Amino acid sequence: MSKRDYYEILEVSRSATADEIKKSYRKIAIKYHPDKNPNDKASEDKFKEAAEAYEILSNDEKRRRYDQYGHQGNRGAGGFSGGSMNMEDIFSQFGDVFGGGGGGSPFESIFGGGGSRGGRRRKGTNLRIKIKLTLQEIAEGVEKKIKVNRLMVDPSTTFKSCPSCQGTGQVRKVMNTMLGQMMSSATCPSCGGAGELVDSKGSGADNSGMNRTEEVIAIKIPAGVSDGIQLSMSGKGNEVAGGVAGDLLIVIEEIEDDQLKRDGNNVIYDLYLSFLDAALGASVEVPTIDGKVKIKIDSGTQSGKILRLKGKGIKDIEGYRRGDQLIHLNVWTPKTLSKEERSILENFKGSKNFIPTPSKNDKGFYEKMKEFFE
């Protein structure tokens, strides 16, 4: 089943402001929150769907990529950014939207619940890496295996429940006010919100029971990505004791090709022809993303003509189509001539076939470009 439009999910227009998006998300999340709809799978799915939409639209860069490329714009090897979010991710990232502060479930004060999920789990820090891709890799998509140094819980480390918060990660107190009793919560100072304390640790672990480990991660890069676009792998960042791992952020860097230039999903190649090949016609070999191909040059070809190789460009990031390769023909005028060559050419100087006589069919550069890119 195809994913719904994020603006439709949050019931806002595409021109909605950040405040309008936040306000609408809060309203929808409260409506479908699992504490308010216990054991209701449909409501939980809508709650997660709204959180995924808010994760994208509340971030200026992710929203720009979504507006430009759709759901694929924030896609990474772990799926769409937000697509694999669980409840802990949602509470960890968006609790501030509901005024939950550093407390447990941000909805406790709204619904009067006892915090069925306990305190919000901490999330490890994100890691950011750059991956360089050739034009060929961008055109088809590629899987890259990279080494990432990330903090992970040492397998020899054991933990015990924090006695100060009984494993919830939160400490609560009841205050008497003129409106009656009110409960407030804060991050447990003993365990830092983890709900656990190190009981024993391995020889290589730090005081938090962590060590730095090199891990080989396979990253699937979709076709059609562009320079500067950022993909996300959920849970592949640094781990944190008693919490969930952060994300791995992958920034794409294009390696400039020596011959082919990218223009959106199209590929541009400048082909220089000798005067004789342009006049007499020829069969010429040109590079493409898929390898070299031969093209026919008609006799009488004019400089500036553009040939199109259909489907020889880059796959669209949405996966619907593939761009073309445009070949710009440039007739090369010799800069130096031998005495014999000059003599031969001077014999044709007065020939009417060598006098420029452009017709209406011989379009100028502007008309040609307009024709190909409309």
Image (cartoon, rainbow, N blue to C red):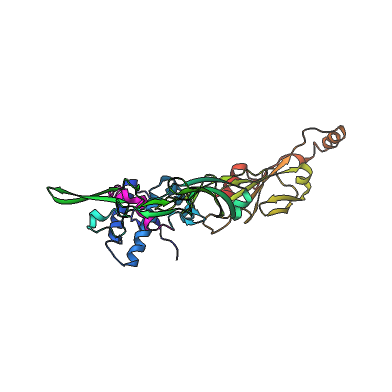
Quadrant of the rendered image containing residue 60 = top left
Front position in the image: 355 or 367: 367
- The magenta-colored residue range is 84-104
Question: Left or right: where does residue 36 sit relative to residue 80?
Answer: left
Q: Residue furthest right?
A: 340
Residue 101 inside the magenta-drawn segment: yes
Front position in the image: 159 or 10: 159
Q: Where does residue 57 sit, x and y in percent of width and height? A: 39, 50
> In which quadrant of the rendered image does the N terminus lie?
bottom left
Front position in the image: 320 or 275: 320
**Residue 17 visible in the current orientation:** no
Front position in the image: 204 or 214: 204
Q: Where does residue 42 sit, x and y in percent of width and height? A: 34, 66
Counting labels gives 0
Q: Where does residue 361 sit, x and y in percent of width and height? A: 65, 48
Q: Residue furthest left?
A: 178
Q: Where does residue 329 sit, x and y in percent of width and height? A: 69, 45
**Residue 61 visible in the current orientation:** yes
Residue 249 inside the magenta-drawn segment: no
Question: Left or right: where does residue 170 sit relative to residue 323?
Answer: left
